[in-house]
Image (cartoon, rainbow, N blue to C red):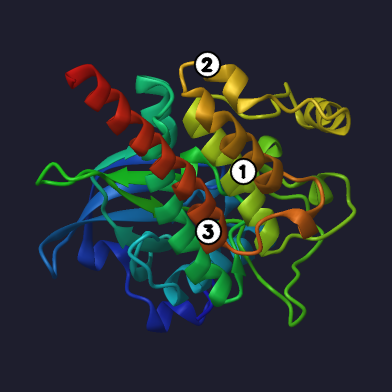
Amino acid sequence: MSVGSEADLSTVPYLEDRYDLVAPIGEGGVATVYRATDRELGVTVAVKILSARWAADTRVLAQFAEEARIATRLSSPHIAEVRGLAVTWSGLPCIVYEHLEGQTLAQRIEEAGALSIEETADVVEQIARGLARAHQSGVIHRDVKPDNVFLVVSDDGAPPIAKLLDFGVAEVTCPNGATTDALLGTPEYIAPEILFGTGRADARSDLYALGVLAFECLTARCPVVGANLDDVLVRMSRGERASVTALRPDLPPELEGPLEAFFERALHEDPFWRFPSARELAGALGDAADLARLLSRRTRLRRAA
């Protein structure tokens, strides 16, 4: 279904006929997200509405339509669920998502600082599941970062459920598994082959971004930090990647080898040497987290003895 075209008006319901907007809960470059009530089902939803200033931009309209198409084809507990499509009376296209209670991973890091290795491994494993589902469907997210991961709080006090958000710049791969050569995403999370124009985005570039996200979870900063795109390019070309264990001296020394080896592979400049799948990346970090749990258990036993 094409969103934002004349044909839509006969197949997509008007937003105002079904949803009551309550309050804005987020704003991006081209759209605003509102908390709303679905009068038909009596539930709270999140409605993403294209901003009026972009209504005449055919490129933005096409990208918004692509987000709707991509999001509706993905089904995973770790990807925000699309509940429907709509259009405002003024003709602005909308995507209706499930409403999530909690906070983004970026907010969590900003408020509470770095996560433990166990928490990091849990978040990475969940997002890896969502990415695996997307990659199986031929979809490359292209903007994996803490701002686009939502931690859903649980009523029973269980660990939060991590969900991948915002497929606004996602692409469906060609038969060979590649995408366009467009430079999309946030510089610190873009894989080297895309930044330097030596390759195109594919599943391995999403996994590079997931590796950056894991690094940020553990250290509250990216491995390569720059003031702008050019700065990131210069620093990356010089190999100025920070060391996770140098930034986390509180971690047991036994974790230095496994963690440095993990990030050496996850963030390798050559996609050939990275983890081949989201499952293997998450498993490798999970092994380090298991070692951390074992070391912590031994420490507790020695103290109790």
* Residue 170 picture location, percent across and down: 60, 61
Say whether residue 89 is visible: no
Look at the picture and state if 285 lies above or below 19: above
Classify 264 as above or below 299. Answer: below
From the viewer's perspective, is residue 143 above or below residue 24?
A: below
Checking the image for residue 262, the label placed there is 1
- Label 2, residues with CA under 10 Å away: few <14, some 14-19, many ≥20: few
Kindly report the distance in space between the C-alpha atoms of the residues bearing marks 1 and 3. Answer: 27 Å
Q: Nearer the viewer, residue 107 or 85?
A: 107
Q: Which numbered disc, 2 or 3, marks the residue that appears first in the sequence?
A: 3
- Can you give x and y, in whole percent of width and height, for residue 107 in the image? 39, 30
Q: In the structure shown, which secondary structural element does the residue marked by tag 3 occupy?
A: loop
Q: Nearer the viewer, mark 1 or mark 3?
A: 1
- The disc labelled 3 sits on which kind of residue? Phe
Amino acid type at circle 2 is Pro
Query: Could one spot residue 297 in this view of the protein?
Result: yes
Q: Which residue is mark 2?
A: 249
Q: Amino acid at mark 1?
A: Phe
Residue drawn at x 69%, y 24% is 242
**134 left or right, relative to 32:** right
Give me the C-alpha separation between circle 2 and circle 1: 17 Å
The answer to whether 130 is drawn above or below residue 292 in the figure is below
Whether label 2 touches label 1, CB < 8 Å? no
Name the image quarter holding residue 119. top left
Q: Nearer the viewer, mark 2 or mark 3?
A: 2
Is disc 1 in contact with disc 3, using a CB cutoff of under 8 Å? no
Task: Count neighbours of disc 3 (C-alpha within 10 A) and say few if under 14, some if 14 to 19, many if 20 or more.
Answer: many
Q: Which residue is mark 3?
A: 167
Instruction: Give the residue displayed 77% in from the left and 79% down from the top.
Output: 176
Q: Secondary structure at mark 2?
A: loop
